[in-house]
Amino acid sequence: MDKVNGRLEILTFGSFDILIDGESLLAQFGKSQKALSLLKYFISNRSKKIPVNRIIDANFKLYDYTDYNNALRSQIHRLRKIIKDINSKLNLDVMKLDFVAGNYVFYLEGNYFLDVELFDELANKFSIKPISINSEGALIAQLKKALELYRGEYIEGTEFLDWIFPLRIHYKREYLILFSQYVCYLLKNELYNEVINECESSLAMNFFDEIIHEYLLEALFKLNKANQAINHYNYVTSRFYTEMNMKPSEKMKEIYQKVQKRENSEYGTDLYTLERTIRLAEQSDGVFFCDKDFFINLYRLELRKKERDIGRTMVGIVTVSAYDLREISEDESNKIVEDIGPVVDKYMRKYDVITKLNKNQFAFMMFNSSEEMIKRINQRMNFLLNQVKKKHKILFTLSCKPIQAIDENYDETAF
């Protein structure tokens, strides 16, 4: 963001700040954090007449005061002293807090910059007339400026106050609309590297917004960066499963399947695709034909099967990905296998099954198991694999589910 000289600058997106000539004034509030919180509320409702009871309900009901009106007056007194001091630094009454007929009204006038005001102006402009593939450079620069203004969620650090959430949701939605406009413009102009840069910057603030991942995967696909696309998809879907109990969007699956089709499944898969592929490949209800080596291995497995009771069978995939999404070489993959072998051998039983799908993934079956058992094993294995992860600068992600007889009942469970 351009430096603002000789005027008041108020930043509301991301970390809230008030500055003059680039110097923060927040230290002036000292221990008066309630007064600062009140100022954030007034800035968010600038130029509006706000009744006393509404201010109390929004800002003071969480606290146990015997007299809420007196508590409000006390904080207003502190806030006015700070406003006066700020105005004196500017030699101008930029901030004003008036009390008119039972209502407080907060004004910003004169030489000031408020990021959310400019953001609102630009969002409204591009809502009325979105950009097109042939839009002029000056218009594209304005759209980029709007995206740069959004440095994070609206007024971070006020999560305990209910009034902030509608505004936060509103501005995030407006940001994503503008973001989609700009990225679609880049895609139409085949500026795929710029799409990747924009998506990576945005994901630092909005990791769980699927649309950003969709654009990123599409750009990677267009640039024939299949391995990066699959690594990103595997990492993202694992986090979605683990942290949000979310499945990937249909659009993400569609892009992923396009990448897989192009690369003939060289680098990776997911549980859904793996299961569908296996089921579709087995079209006959008759005898199962296989080669000699497979028959011998299956016979050995059946011998081990006698040592256990019939129970629930879990199928899963372990995905290995690099911190920086770099491509893991075949040689590095073999070294990782050597290092994790003793850990896997300790926690997987001799009648369980594991196979290397590709250089990034392993599939396994655990018989007579449950989701809770897999979760415990995963926690223990992750603890023991820390040294392996640090050595190779990699991440392990696990997703698993019970094998089901009917494909339509597919319901992914992941840990």
Image (cartoon, rainbow, N blue to C red):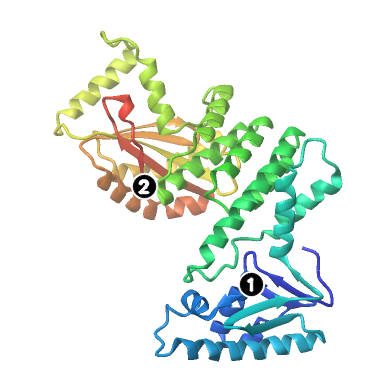
Residue 85 at x, y percent in the picture: 72, 90
Q: Residue at x 75, y 73 (%)?
A: 9
**Within-10-Å neighbours for mark 2: few <14, some 14–19, many 20+:** many
Left or right of 47, for residue 412: left
**Most distant residue in the front direction:** 101
Amino acid type, label 2:
Phe
Name the residue nearer the viewer: 48 or 214: 48
- Vertical order, 161 against 292 (above or below): below
Q: Residue at x 54, y 91 (%)?
A: 74
The answer to whether residue 205 is seen in the rendering is: no
- Vertical order, 185 against 378 (above or below): above
Q: Residue at x 36, y 47 (%)?
A: 415
Residue 106 at x, y percent in the picture: 66, 78
Q: Which mark is residue 48?
A: 1
Residue 381 at x, y percent in the picture: 35, 50
- Vertical order, 223 against 394 (above or below): above
Left or right of 266, for residue 304: left
Q: CA distance from mark 1 to mark 2?
A: 48 Å
Left or right of 54, for residue 121: right
Amino acid type, label 1:
Lys
Quadrant where the N terminus sits is bottom right
Q: Which label's residue is closer to the chain start, 1 or 2?
A: 1
- The answer to the question of whether label 1 and label 2 lie on touching residues, with beta carbons closer than 8 A, is no
Label total for image = 2
The answer to whether residue 187 is seen in the rendering is: yes
Q: Residue at x 58, y 38 (%)?
A: 214
Secondary structure type for disc 1: loop
Secondary structure type for disc 2: loop
Mark 1 or 2: in front is: 1
Determine which quarter of the picture holds residue 12.
bottom right
- Vertical order, 54 against 268 (above or below): below
**What residue is shown with label 2?**
415
